[in-house]
């Protein structure tokens, strides 16, 4: 029976990574984890403590700082391969996964599949003719040097590329190494992994070439394995199911999509949403069971595209995953956004909630990928409770603390009707603040009286609607703490601590 060394490339959520590693190693296989060097030391120590005493779970101690599209991802993977070959001499296959992957089929089925069809499972399409790249740079990925990261330094990335184009500085491609491209998630036989590392050692010019290419994790292994292994011993049908949205982002799957997920005929799925704990538990149970799973006949990608298409026609079935009750909400309403944002963050730190930012006032505040849902502010404001339910699920939070502008009376009424706790912090409308606010909204300094009247009307409307309790300018700290505790349903001691910091109440 095949023995596997799982290579786990992760960058966040140490508790979940540890649980994933324990699951993969539960039946005697080895797991090697590379935890991104960009993650904090506290997360690293938490991961190390969570897998301590597990002899078949190994951590790469020299952590690389990984950047999307950079050679560092390949370097981290090579480090895991070396560790796996050393620590797991019985492992016949090395299987690369991300921290967001979960198994779809029982481990026994995976082992039987690897035994029945000895091959390397890696997508390796012709780089220049396959059309694998759908958007963005194509041949430029390898023809030019990319010393800067496009996401971290977009202007430097573009300037370096433009300069090379202008000067005609195209690189010479390796003459005996036809370039290949494909998914970065693969499963290689032990001898293939050894051959890859041997080639890197014997021909250092090959990794040196890919070091300055763009997104080398989609080309390096694919090119090298295709060079080393005959096509008859390679399968383009990789073991991990990948599905991308219309916007080029990986699709996240949720609890209410379990029926489609469990019918998939692949062995792993990327990605499972952070909040999909029910689906995650079911997949773990299935992975460790001895009986073969039934119904492995469906193409999950085809089913997803069919359902997504019906959603665009307004006939989605099953109902969209964001149609669920909103999380516990605490809203801080203040015209001074920085005051509301600071209080929301501090409140979240003290209560274990999440503070995703000014979601209804700043288009760029949305951090989790929702597959295009909620990209526009007007869409978020149209159905605020449903939108926040989707955000909470995506980040795995049960409670949210948000800043909000007083102008959103209708939105606040809708959320208060769903049980949100709302605190308003009144604004002292002095000339300095009015001038700054007028400048921010493009009015200049000639309408300060009208601006002051508008702000007063917004706050008065909230008061008449009875939507929130308010801390007004001039309230003492004791009175402010009592108001905050009642409005947000938090202990008075916590409210007193928060009100002791004048930056949190706009004093």
Image (cartoon, rainbow, N blue to C red):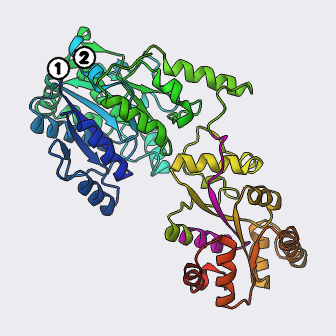
Q: Position of residue 311 (x, y in %)?
A: 68, 27
**SS under mark 1:** loop
Position of residue 410 relative to residue 214, above or below, is below
Instruction: Rate crowding at label 1 as few (under 14), some (14 to 19) or many (20 or more) other CA atoms within 10 Å.
Output: few
Report which quarter residue 478 is drawn in.
bottom right
Q: Is residue 441 visible?
A: yes
Instruction: Rate crowding at label 2 as few (under 14), some (14 to 19) or many (20 or more) other CA atoms within 10 Å.
Output: few
Q: Residue at x 64, y 28 (%)?
A: 318
Question: Residue pushed farthest top?
Answer: 232
Position of residue 450 relative to residue 107, above or below, is below
1 and 2 marks in contact (CB < 8 Å): yes
Out of 439 and 61, give the one closest to the viewer: 61
The quadrant in which the C terminus is found is bottom right
Position of residue 143 relative to residue 487, above or below, is above
Position of residue 477 relative to residue 375, above or below, is below
Residue 323 among magenta residues? yes
Residue named by callout 2: 112
Q: Residue at x 61, y 85 (%)?
A: 502
Q: Which residues fall within the magenta stretch?
A: 322-346
Q: Position of residue 180 (x, y in %)?
A: 33, 21
Looking at the rendered structure, which numbered label has been put on residue 1?
A: 1
Q: Position of residue 467 (x, y in %)?
A: 80, 67
Q: Residue at x 48, y 16 (%)?
A: 298
Q: Is residue 170 visible?
A: no
Out of 487 and 171, give the one closest to the viewer: 487
**SS under mark 2:** helix
């Amino acid at each position: 029976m095949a023995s596997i060394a799982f290579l786990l490339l992760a960058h966040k959520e140490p508790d979940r990574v540890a649980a994933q590693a324990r699951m993969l190693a539960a039946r005697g296989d080895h797991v090697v984890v590379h935890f991104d060097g960009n993650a904090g030391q506290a997360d690293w120590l938490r991961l190390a403590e969570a897998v301590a005493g597990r002899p078949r779970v190994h951590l790469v101690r020299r952590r690389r700082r990984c950047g999307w599209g950079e050679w560092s991802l390949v370097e981290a993977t090579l480090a895991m391969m070396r560790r796996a070959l050393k620590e797991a001499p019985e492992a016949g296959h090395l299987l690369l996964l991300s921290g967001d992957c979960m198994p779809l089929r029982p481990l026994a089925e995976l082992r039987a599949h690897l035994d029945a069809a000895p091959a390397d499972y890696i997508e390796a399409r012709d780089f220049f003719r396959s059309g694998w790249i759908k958007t963005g740079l194509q041949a430029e990925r390898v023809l030019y040097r990319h010393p800067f990261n496009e996401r971290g330094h977009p202007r430097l990335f573009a300037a370096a590329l433009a300069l090379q184009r202008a000067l005609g500085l195209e690189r010479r491609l390796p003459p005996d190494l036809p370039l290949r491209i494909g998914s970065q998630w693969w499963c290689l036989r032990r001898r293939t992994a050894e051959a890859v590392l041997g080639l890197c050692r014997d021909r250092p010019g090959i990794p040196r070439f890919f070091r300055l290419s763009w997104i080398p994790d989609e080309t390096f292994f694919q090119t090298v394995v295709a060079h080393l292994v005959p096509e008859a011993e390679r399968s383009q049908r990789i073991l991990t199911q990948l599905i991308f949205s219309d916007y080029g982002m990986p699709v996240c799957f949720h609890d209410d999509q379990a029926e489609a997920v469990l019918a998939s005929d692949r062995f792993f799925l990327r990605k499972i949403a952070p909040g999909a704990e029910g689906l995650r538990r079911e997949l773990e149970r299935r992975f460790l069971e001895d009986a073969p799973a039934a119904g492995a006949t469906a193409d999950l990608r085809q089913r997803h595209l069919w359902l997504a298409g019906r959603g665009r026609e307004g006939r989605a079935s099953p109902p969209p995953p964001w149609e669920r009750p909103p999380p516990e909400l605490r809203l801080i309403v203040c015209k001074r956004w920085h005051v509301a944002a600071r209080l929301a963050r501090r409140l979240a730190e003290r209560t274990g909630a999440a503070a995703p930012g000014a979601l209804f006032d700043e288009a760029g505040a949305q951090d989790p990928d929702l597959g295009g849902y909620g990209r526009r502010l007007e869409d978020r404001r149209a159905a605020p409770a449903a939108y926040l339910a989707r955000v909470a699920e995506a980040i795995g939070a049960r409670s949210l603390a948000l800043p909000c502008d007083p102008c959103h009376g209708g939105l606040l009424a809708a959320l208060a009707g769903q049980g949100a706790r709302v605190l308003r912090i009144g604004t002292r409308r002095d000339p300095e603040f009015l001038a700054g606010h007028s400048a921010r909204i493009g009015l200049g300094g000639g309408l300060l009286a009208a601006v002051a009247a508008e702000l007063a009307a917004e706050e008065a409307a909230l008061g008449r609607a009875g939507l929130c309790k308010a801390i007004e300018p001039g309230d003492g700290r004791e009175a402010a703490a009592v108001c905050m505790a009642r409005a947000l349903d938090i202990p008075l001691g916590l409210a007193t601590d928060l009100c002791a910091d004048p930056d949190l109440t706009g004093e």
